[in-house]
Amino acid sequence: MSGPLDGIRVLDLSAVVVGPICTHVLCEHGAEVIKIEAPPTGDLLRSLAGKGRSTGMNGKFLNFNRGKKSLAIDLKKPAGIAALQKLARSVDVFVTNIRPDAQARLGVDEASLRAVAPRLIHCSITGFGTGGPYAGRPAYDTVIQGVSGVAGAFEASTGEPRYVPFLVADHTVGLIAAQMIGFALYRREKTGQGEAIEVPMFENMAAYIMQEHLGAASFRPALGPPGDHRVLSPDGKPLPTKDGFICISANTDAQAHAFFDAIDRPELKTDPRFAKVAQRVQHTKEYFHIRATSLGGKTSAEWLEIFDRADVPVSPYNTIGSLIDDPHLRAVGMVTEEEHPTEGPTWAIGRPNSFSGGVAPPRPPAPRLGADGAAVLAEAGLTQEDIETLRKDGVLIEEMPT
């Protein structure tokens, strides 16, 4: 069976995380993704993300770029741009996270590419949207976490500004970009017209924070300060047990009452601070403190069994090291062993979502730099003579330097 994006071709001029996450999602659902990389070293992530068995093939790069084809071509040379524009005529979607001014200099901005490919979906992922004073600034995940209020939410919770210790802005906005591309492809099916999409990181992450935390400050005049104190509670974290941690959320009255019974505090079910949802919200600090200090007498395994039997939402606590061994992830095929043709045995991360109408077949492992260059250009209509000229002129690179 094929995935829902079977037959869709994507030209991916993006690097590091936010753009590659977007095209990873498209690829996982059946799209053919051609990754354009700048020689001589390719995507910065090949160098930025730590150790691998060979140059440019670290674990993070393998995970974000599974199933893609790599074309390493120098876009600073006219022949490189000409080749890319010829490729653009044969694809459905173009994705980039380079800044708009650089897009224009390279001739890969929306106006330039849609002039030669009117049905193209052109998706530009930017740090900041056009029209505001931050437009055109460079941005990475931590820059966006800081300006959008993500780090500020940590300050409101713990007293210290912090970044989420994974690239939450890059991942979130990459998924939003894939969603926007899906919307554009649907509209093109109805109208036949291409589309220009801008997906700014700051605006998207700021919207998340404001939706979550404006709260009483949503009204004019404000009914109170911003910030959901339940989410910001310093006790809103994994709960310590006799031998580790577990994770619980008891929000409904039935769940909270079952929790009180389980910890042998049935009197709390009629306590005016905790009997009903609205009362527990008003007394979040006390309620969360009870949860955080009541589980030390039993092991994690014992509590998991007790709460599961009581239908209280509960899960084991995983470290970043134990996650790969989680029995549920193994059972549903989210973590499997794979033999990379050049990198040897690796763990492969599976697809978390599915369609009843079929899924794309398993994707091949992530490519070495330039591995598919000649084949991709030949498919776009370049002759063998054209391709050989690009090689000789140093425009096309097909080997990762050691």
Image (spheres, helix red, strand yellow):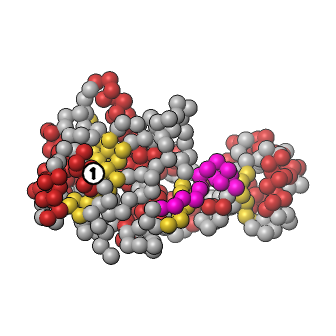
Q: Position of residue 118 (x, y in %)?
A: 19, 34
Left or right? Give the position of 371 relative to 381.
Answer: right
Kindly tell me whether residue 210 is visible in this rendering.
no
Q: Position of residue 80 (x, y in %)?
A: 16, 56
Left or right? Give the position of 72 relative to 32.
Answer: left
Which quadrant: the C terminus?
bottom left
Per the image, is 199 magenta? Answer: no
Kindly tell me whether residue 100 is visible in this rendering.
yes
Q: Position of residue 397 (x, y in %)?
A: 23, 64
Front residue of 192 and 400: 400
Q: Can you say whether 309 is above or below 75 in the image?
A: above
Q: Which residues are magenta?
A: 327-340
The residue that mark 1 highlights is: 375
Q: Residue at x 36, y 63 (%)?
A: 368
Left or right? Give the position of 294 relative to 385.
Answer: right
Quarter residue 370 falls in: bottom left
Per the image, is 333 magenta? Answer: yes
